[in-house]
Image (tube, helix red, strand yellow):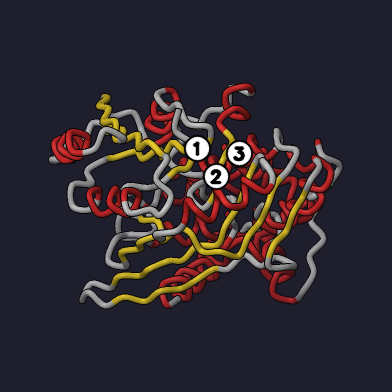
């Protein structure tokens, strides 16, 4: 049985997947298997991963009909035999000593979860690159939490509830972490299917609810490759409800563990609301003016937003202004603010 199972969902990744797999094969720690799950690609991805599997016996190539990234990861877990799970996206890569860093710490203590630093490599349309590192020093270079109480108490502020860390929320991704397979199997944890966003965050919260020990280290192990020419934002009316549902799951998770984060959630709901309205200005929004007005009205009439407008206690002039503008329910005023935020977002 390999120590590590590396699970990689593959969809139309013929240009990147070999580079990603090579970043695993070149690890200084080599007791692993690679589970490549082709999720009904329409390009040559399946051919590429079959070729890779023939070259190295540690690679398993699986094909399935297109079912989404969550289903592909669940398929990968089902076919994995390692003691630990590591997840990777098909266009990213690991640093060469990533697995050794994890295993050195696990030899010291068999943590249920290790979270490491990561970096993002931004590739411009002209081919230029910029690397931004995120060392998760938290309060120290190395942060050990050896009980369920310590885990929840210390990690509650970095689960995305604090707006200050929302943009770099370390639980928005499963890729800079190593999970204990036994914990996932015993608790029958799966990635939620049928949603286009937030699946990693929901899986991480479900897993976090099952752990009794965790370690945060500053070592950088994972490299997210970000193609800046690709569309980052898109307009989908369903996204608003999905984000609200994810925030509700987060609120219930924290409440279950003794922390009332309602005010934090309300703050994030304001961000979510303006983000939804800002996305209406995207080029891919094919809605008519009447459909945009209907979407606008449905958002402000939703139970989550009505509760937020009634119960939120804003701190700071800017947040207070955003909240007051929403309370007016005035379409033109709110959309003007949303357009300004849309323009600012596009400049960042």
Q: How many marks?
A: 3
Q: Where 152 sits versus 224, above or below?
A: above
Disc 2 residue crowd, few under 14, some 14–19, many 20+, Cα 10 Å: many
Expressed as whole percent of the image width and height from the top left, the position of residue 238 reads: 46, 40
Query: Viewer-nearest of labels 3 and 2?
Result: 2
Q: What is the spatial separation of the Cα atoms under label 3 and label 2, in whole angstroms?
A: 26 Å
**Residue linked to disc 1:** 85
Secondary structure of residue under mark 3: helix
Query: Viewer-nearest of labels 1 and 3?
Result: 1
Contact flag, marks 1 and 2 (Cβ < 8 Å): yes
Q: Residue at x 80, y 40 (%)?
A: 148
Q: Where 280 sits versus 103, above or below?
A: below
Secondary structure of residue under mark 1: strand
Expressed as whole percent of the image width and height from the top left, the position of residue 221 reads: 48, 59
Q: What is the spatial separation of the Cα atoms under label 1 and label 3, in whole angstroms?
A: 27 Å
Res 178 visible = yes
**Residue linked to disc 3:** 245
Q: Residue at x 65, y 45 (%)?
A: 247
Q: Which of the two discs, 1 and 2, labels the residue nearer the N terminus?
A: 1
Disc 3 residue crowd, few under 14, some 14–19, many 20+, Cα 10 Å: some
Image quarter of residue 348: bottom left
Of 212 and 4, nearer the camera is: 4
Q: What is the spatial separation of the Cα atoms under label 1 and label 2, in whole angstroms?
A: 6 Å
Expressed as whole percent of the image width and height from the top left, the position of residue 74 reads: 44, 28
- Locate the N terminus and report the quarter of the image it occupies: top left
Q: Which of the two discs, 3 and 2, labels the residue nearer the N terminus?
A: 2
Q: Which of the two discs, 1 and 3, labels the residue nearer the N terminus?
A: 1
**Residue linked to disc 2:** 178
């Amino acid at each position: 049985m390999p120590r590590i199972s590396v699970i990689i969902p593959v969809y139309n990744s013929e240009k990147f997947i070999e580079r990603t797999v090579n970043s695993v094969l070149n690890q200084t720690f080599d007791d692993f298997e690679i589970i490549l799950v082709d999720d009904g690609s329409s390009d040559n991805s399946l051919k590429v991963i079959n070729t890779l599997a023939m070259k190295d016996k540690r690679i398993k190539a699986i094909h399935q009909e297109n079912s989404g990234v969550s289903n592909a990861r669940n398929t990968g877990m089902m076919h994995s035999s390692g003691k630990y799970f590591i997840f990777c996206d098909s266009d990213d890569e690991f640093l060469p000593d990533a697995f050794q860093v994890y295993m050195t710490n696990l030899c010291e203590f068999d943590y249920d979860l290790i979270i490491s630093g990561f970096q993002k490599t931004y590739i411009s349309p002209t081919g230029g690159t910029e690397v931004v590192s995120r060392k998760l020093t938290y309060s120290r270079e190395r942060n050990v939490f050896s009980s369920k109480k310590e885990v929840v108490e210390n990690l509650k502020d970095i689960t995305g509830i604090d707006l200050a860390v929302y943009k770099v929320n370390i639980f928005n991704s499963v890729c800079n972490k190593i999970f204990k397979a036994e914990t996932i199997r015993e608790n029958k944890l799966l990635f939620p299917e049928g949603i286009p966003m937030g699946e990693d965050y929901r899986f991480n919260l479900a897993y976090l609810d099952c752990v009794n020990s965790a370690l945060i280290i500053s070592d950088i192990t994972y490299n997210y490759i970000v193609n800046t020419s690709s569309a980052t934002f898109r307009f989908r009316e369903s996204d608003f409800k999905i984000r609200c549902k994810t925030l509700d799951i987060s609120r219930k998770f924290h409440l279950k563990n003794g922390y009332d984060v309602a005010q934090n959630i309300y703050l994030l709901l304001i961000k979510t609301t303006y983000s939804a309205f800002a996305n209406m200005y995207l080029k891919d929004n094919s809605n008519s003016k009447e459909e945009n007005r209907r979407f606008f009205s449905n958002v402000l009439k939703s139970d989550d937003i009505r509760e937020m407008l009634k119960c939120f206690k804003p701190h700071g002039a800017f947040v207070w202004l955003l909240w007051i503008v929403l309370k007016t329910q005035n379409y033109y005023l709110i959309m003007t603010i949303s357009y300004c935020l849309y323009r600012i977002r596009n400049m960042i």
